[in-house]
Image (spheres, rainbow, N blue to C red):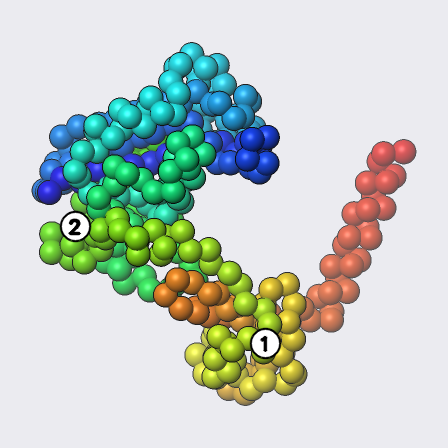
Amino acid sequence: MNFVILDLEWNGAYSKKAKKFVNEIIEFGAVKTDEKLNIIDTFSMLVTPQIGKKLNSRVAALTHITTEELIDSNNTFTHVLSRFKKFLGDSVLLTWGTSDILTLIENCKYYLGEEKLSFLTTYCNLQSYCEHQLDHHDKSKQMGLSTCAQALSISSDGLELHRGYDDALFSLKCFQKLYDREKIREFIEVANDEFYRKITFKNTVIYDIKNPLIDKKEFYICCDKCGKKARRKTKWISKNRSFRAQFRCNKCKRDFEGRLTFRLKYDGVTVDRRVVEKVKPENEEKRKNFLEKFITNNSVEEK
């Protein structure tokens, strides 16, 4: 069993044809390994944009890719995809999180009119696997690649991050540190209809307190200092796609605001709990005075 770790770079561009923004892929980067995670092949190709003629400034700054480089590469998406298909073969495809695989699906749908990746047989979300191996089970806060590498004391020295090939190599370094030949099999999925229903499911925030999917037993907040359940002082209100109420921790003798966010995902509803410190009146007054002085001083300087 071989593995292929893929990393994509893309540029947000408005398509008149689709009448919406499309994450247009501008670079493929990948590494292929054997079952012992030894590198046996590599892949790196730029893609000449066909939707957006100019790179977003943020993308250009992040990747250091220039529009001229993309044009000079003279590679259409379909050409690069054809080359990548041969590179992938029957290997297991891995990406860090689902953003890259979803973007690949989006581009295949746009250019080829295909809802599914005909060349994909098996897939693994490397981010989910690494989170499991590191006992990171907070579904509301996914672990980024750099955070994972830092936890494993993996250096990015010599790597040009936010570039396809180097990010794929960085992902492999994390994979090698956490590799368990038997455990990884539990995370490998067959690319069948159920797989596509799951991966393309759009997570939504539930902010209607009467929604039957919300379990009323989840309406509680624990003090982030002592871990004890706090006493609710006010009614729950819905604000900015979350539920909020004022709480008091009797043990710590402190007041704070508790916030709950319910997200409907493919495998059920998850709850994100947050504690937000209350701003003391005297601190709020100091903040206002500081802002007033700052504005006044700037106005004087401008004159």
Q: Is residue 243 above or below residue 2?
A: below
- At 64% from the left edge and 71% from the top edge, which residue is drawn? 238
| Residue type marked 2 | Tyr
- At 74% from the left edge and 59% from the top edge, which residue is drawn? 287
Q: Residues within 10 Å of mark 1 (few under 14, many from 20)?
A: some
Helix or strand or loop: what does disc 2 sit on?
loop
Q: Position of residue 182 (x, y in %)?
A: 11, 56
Helix or strand or loop: what does disc 1 sit on?
loop
| Residue type marked 1 | Ile
Q: Which labelled disc corresponds to residue 179?
A: 2
Question: Front-most of 219 and 297?
Answer: 219
Q: Which labelled disc corresponds to residue 209?
A: 1
**Quadrant holding the C terminus:** top right
Q: Position of residue 49 (x, y in %)?
A: 47, 23
- At 18% from the left edge and 33% from the top edge, which residue is drawn? 89
Q: Which labelled disc corresponds to residue 218?
A: none
**Quadrant holding the N terminus:** top left
Question: Front-most of 56 and 112?
Answer: 112
Question: Front-most of 135 and 210?
Answer: 210
Q: Position of residue 123 (x, y in %)?
A: 25, 47
Q: Position of residue 199 (x, y in %)?
A: 36, 52
Instruction: Tell me, yes or no, if residue 145 can be seen here.
Output: no
Left or right: 109, with 293 as reference point: left
N-terminal of the pair, mark 2 or mark 1, is 2
Tags 2 and 1 touching, CB below 8 Å: no
Identity of the residue furthest to the top in this view: 72
